[in-house]
Image (cartoon, rainbow, N blue to C red):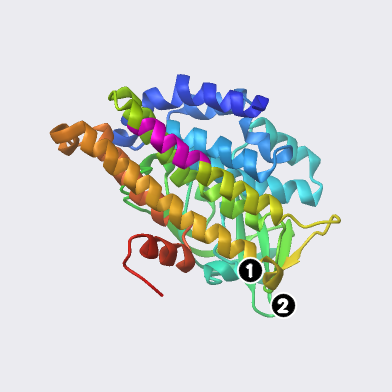
């Protein structure tokens, strides 16, 4: 295992998992969680780790505390863009965790172009809506993708302390799990200064897009890992071992696909058509991951018995977290794969 994976295991075991029930009940991520991740060097893993390692680290952190792992995952979309832009000073702050970032993908074609940008005096005006934006009031910096219909492209703008920006109206969302992630819906009518840090054409995507699909799978796989830990604690060792085999096999499939789809020859972009095959495989596996998380959470419920109906029990929390993971960062193809796995769709 890498140094980063070892560090994630240590943070998840010592800091995150012991707090998971309290974070779920109170809906607040302790500052100690964010500081422990920074001390472990885990805010900078995108600078050196590939998607397989990042996915495993995310899985480990989510298994400790879903809300904390969810916020951690958002950070790397901005770090990657900042590194590509060559802003070494900002990249160093993000790598060290002295600044934590969040991201909104709403302006991308994959997210419906629901945020738009138009040039105005002093910068760009952002209008529209981010339906799910995580880390509001937690992150120091927001990278928001906004669409420009005149150029057929989307650009990422950086916003310091987004909750302080005039013209950003945030509404908290009552999530069934991960409430401490401070996920909100934001209506935008705001002007941001400066030039965008990244730009992508509607029919192209960055080479990190497949990695993003893989990293998002960490939510479901992290719930699986947490459920296996609970099965062990309940004395269901045979069931836990069988579940571990299934999780390991699924993770290996994910990594084989994403590593096989990495652009060769230093290419900076791949077209949507070039990426379609690997995306389809990753979405299918995302559906399988959702099903495995739901099954393992149900297995914890069966082993726990009647105590699982008590609010705040590990079984009850894991079921909610499995539902959350099944639809977070979702796509229609993931839902289709999930329905097929449930034998509710046969086409």
> Picture quarter containing residue 150?
bottom right
Q: Nearer the viewer, residue 330 or 342?
A: 342
Q: Which residue is the extreme one toward the right?
A: 265
> Which secondary structure lies at badge 2?
loop
Q: Earlier in the sequence, mark 1 or mark 2?
A: 2
Q: On residue 208, which mark appears?
A: none
Residue 158 placement (x, y as % from top left): 65, 53
Residue 146 placement (x, y as % from top left): 61, 66
Kindly check if marks 1 and 2 are in contact, taking CB atoms under 8 A apart as contact. Answer: no
Q: Is residue 255 above or below residue 198?
A: above
Q: Nearer the viewer, residue 192 or 233?
A: 233
Residue extent of the magenta highlight: 239-248
Q: Is residue 286 above or below residue 123?
A: above
Q: On residue 276, which mark appears?
A: 1
Q: Residue at x 53, y 71 (%)?
A: 112
Viewport quadrant of the N terminus: top right
In this figure, which residue is indicated by the disc labeled 2? 151
> Which secondary structure lies at badge 1?
helix
Q: Which residue is the extreme one toward the left?
A: 306
């Amino acid at each position: 295992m890498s140094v980063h994976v070892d560090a994630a295991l240590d943070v998840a075991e010592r800091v995150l998992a012991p707090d998971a029930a309290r974070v779920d009940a109170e809906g607040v991520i302790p500052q100690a969680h964010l500081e422990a991740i920074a001390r472990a060097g885990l805010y900078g893993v995108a600078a050196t780790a590939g998607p397989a390692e990042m996915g495993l680290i995310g899985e480990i952190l989510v298994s400790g505390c879903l809300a904390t792992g969810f916020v951690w995952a958002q950070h790397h979309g901005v770090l990657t863009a900042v590194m590509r832009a060559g802003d070494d000073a900002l990249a160093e702050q993000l790598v060290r965790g002295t600044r934590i970032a969040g991201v909104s993908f709403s302006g991308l074609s994959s997210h419906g172009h629901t945020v738009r940008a138009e040039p105005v005096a002093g910068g760009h005006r952002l209008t529209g809506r981010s339906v799910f934006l995580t880390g509001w009031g937690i992150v120091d910096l927001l990278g928001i993708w906004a669409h420009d219909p005149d150029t057929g492209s989307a650009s990422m703008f950086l916003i310091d302390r987004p909750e302080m920006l005039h013209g950003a109206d945030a509404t908290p969302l009552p999530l069934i799990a991960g409430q401490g992630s401070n996920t909100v819906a934001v209506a935008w009518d705001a002007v941001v200064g400066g030039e965008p840090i990244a730009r992508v054409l509607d029919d192209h995507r960055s080479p990190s897009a497949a990695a993003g699909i893989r990293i998002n799978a960490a939510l479901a796989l992290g719930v699986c890992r947490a459920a296996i830990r609970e099965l062990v604690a309940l004395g269901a060792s045979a069931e836990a071992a069988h579940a571990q085999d299934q999780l390991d096999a699924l993770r290996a499939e994910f990594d084989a696909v994403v590593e096989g789809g990495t652009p060769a020859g230093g290419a900076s972009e791949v077209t949507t058509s070039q990426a379609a095959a690997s995306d389809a495989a990753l979405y299918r596996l995302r559906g399988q991951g959702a099903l495995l998380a739901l099954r393992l959470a149900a297995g914890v419920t069966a082993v726990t018995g009647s105590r699982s109906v008590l609010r705040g029990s590990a079984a009850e929390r894991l079921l909610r977290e499995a539902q959350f993971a099944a639809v977070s960062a979702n796509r229609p193809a993931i839902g289709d794969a999930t329905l097929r796995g449930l034998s509710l769709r046969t086409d």
